[in-house]
Each structure stands twice: as C-alpha cells, then as structure tokens.
Amino acid sequence: MAFQPYTPKPITDIFTADTDVDRRKCHRTVPMRVLALGLGRTGTASLRTALKELGFTDCYHMMSASVENPPDCLMWQDAFAAKYDDEGEFGREQWDQLLGHCQAVCDWPAVAFAKELIQAYPEAKVILTTRDVDSWHASTMRTVDWRVNDPELRFVALWDWGAGLYQPMLRKFWDVFFKGDFKKYGKEVFHDYYAEVRSLVPKDNLLEYRIGQGWGPLCEFLEVSAPEGKRFPHTNDTDGFVDRCRARNRAQMYNILFRGFMMGGGIMATLLSASVTWYRFGSRLSAFRS
C-alpha cells in the first residue's frame, strides 16, 4: 500500500535503537557515486562495509530499512506502487528524498529498481556482485526467504512500530520481484536480472565483482586507494542471520509488552505476554508436527 502517512516512533520503544527520520521531508545532501546492484546474498553486506571504509558514506542496504530507520519502508512502498501497481510517481526527486544522505546503494529492495536508479543517477559507477546461482539460491532460501515467511515477524508486525513498517514492505518486494514463489522462480529471476543490468550499463562503467577478489579490482574501478593493513570485510554470514532476526523479534516483543504495561497497566501486559507466549508455542508445535 502506497502513501501511508509517517508516524513517529513510540517513546515506549526502548528495546530497539531505530531512528525515525521521515525521508519524505529530506533531500540530497551528498552525490550518488556508486550503484551496487548485485542481488542480496552475493556479499552485499560485506561490500557495504567496504564502501564505507573507502569513504562512500553512507551506503544504503536493506538493513537501513529493517533495523536502522524503518520509516524508509514507507517510501519503498511508494516506489513499489509506482512501478508495479501504476499508482503515483517515483522519480529522481523521490530517490533523492529516500537516498539523499547516501553516496552508494546496494542490496534489496534497491535491486527491484535497477533500471530506475541507473536512469536517475547516470553519473554513478555500477558494481554487480555475483556468485554461483545454486549456492546463492540455497543461501537465500535459508535466510531472506525464511525471513519473509517468518511467522514470528508477521505476528510482531501486528503490534510493533518498526516491524509493522518493515514486514509489509519485505513481503511486497519478495512477491513482485520473485513472482510470488522464490523457491520456484529464484534462479530464473537471477539469470534474467543479471542479463538486464548488463544490457543497461556501458561496459566501461560496470564492474562485475566477487567478494573474494578483495580490495584490488574494487579500488581500481572506483579510483581510490586500498586501505593499508586492513583485510577485506566479511559480514552477514548465513549461520548468524536467523539468530539476529530472532533477537530482533524478541526486542520488538519487549517493546510491545512495555507499551502495554505503560498504557494499560499490568492486566494489559499480562494479556499481551500470554498472547506472545501462546503464539510462539503454537508456531513451534506446528513446525514440530510438520
């Protein structure tokens, strides 16, 4: 759903450190220099850290919307509505509002707008991170596809401010980009997407890059010096992804319980606590039975 109004973060959300910047009131403050348009799970979190180390600050990533500033999801929903539902417009002005504080962008959901971003920022260099499609698909199934379908996240999103902004946007992105079935269409979309980006970018402005190549090709392409004595970053590994997401769920559940206590007293908090406990027990029982 597009054009939802911005609402500030509740003061009772003390268990999460999210900011609540309304991007619709922002504008571009730094030039967009890098469009890193490889699909998520191709090393985009490591690339984000590397680009920031090289001075490209800030670098937008899905984490910017999921755990840093959830109101960004409102503008992403506007962008999805404009592209996929023919509702409203989303052009350079809106991209500058959403991404105006960033010199680089990577990961999803930005990849759903590769063509639009290339048109909006033709002066930016384009990096296409990639990896073997089978290992990428397996990794994504265990991480982001799991997160999209995480029943705890769906439940928390009914009550928590940040989750309520993020989960609908994530679901919309996954459905429109992967044709409603990542397991079935993921590899097909992977191949089609990379072919499309290659067709859109002049070869001299495109770096196809694997994270294992390190600083050399990246710094040469961006015309910057490699950091002395620093190893290339490796972050957001598959093994820790689920644990981090579940920790986020717990923090948001604590927000819900604390708000219930402050607004409705002990009885409300008890009811919410019982609801959360019963829901989590029911989800695990269903998983055990299946």
Image: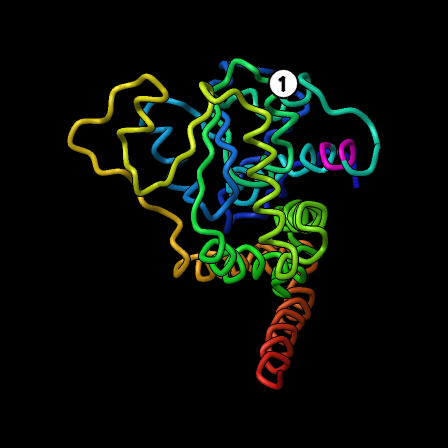
Visible residue check, residue 161: no
Q: Nearer the viewer, residue 222 or 262?
A: 222
Q: Residue at x 63, y 18 (%)?
A: 120
Callout 1: few (<14), some (14-19), or many (20+) C-alpha neighbours within 10 Å? Answer: some
Q: Nearer the viewer, residue 182 or 189?
A: 189
What is the magenta segment's predominant secondary structure? helix
The image shows residue 246 at horizontal and vertical percentages of: 50, 61
Q: Quadrant of residue 219?
A: top left
The image shows residue 122 at horizontal and vertical percentages of: 57, 15
Q: Please determine whether, in this image, residue 185 is positioned above or below residue 192.
A: below
Q: Give the secondary structure at mark 1.
A: helix
Q: Which residue is mark 1?
A: 120
Q: How is the image coloured?
A: rainbow
* Name of the residue lying farthest toward the bottom: 289
Q: Residue at x 32, y 45 (%)?
A: 234
Q: Which residues are magenta?
A: 79-83
* Name of the residue lying farthest toward the left: 229
The image shows residue 181 at horizontal and vertical percentages of: 68, 58
Q: Residue at x 71, y 47 (%)?
A: 172
- In which quadrant is the N terminus drawn? top right
From the viewer's perspective, tell me whether residue 225 is left or right of residue 80: left
Q: Amino acid at mark 1?
A: Ala
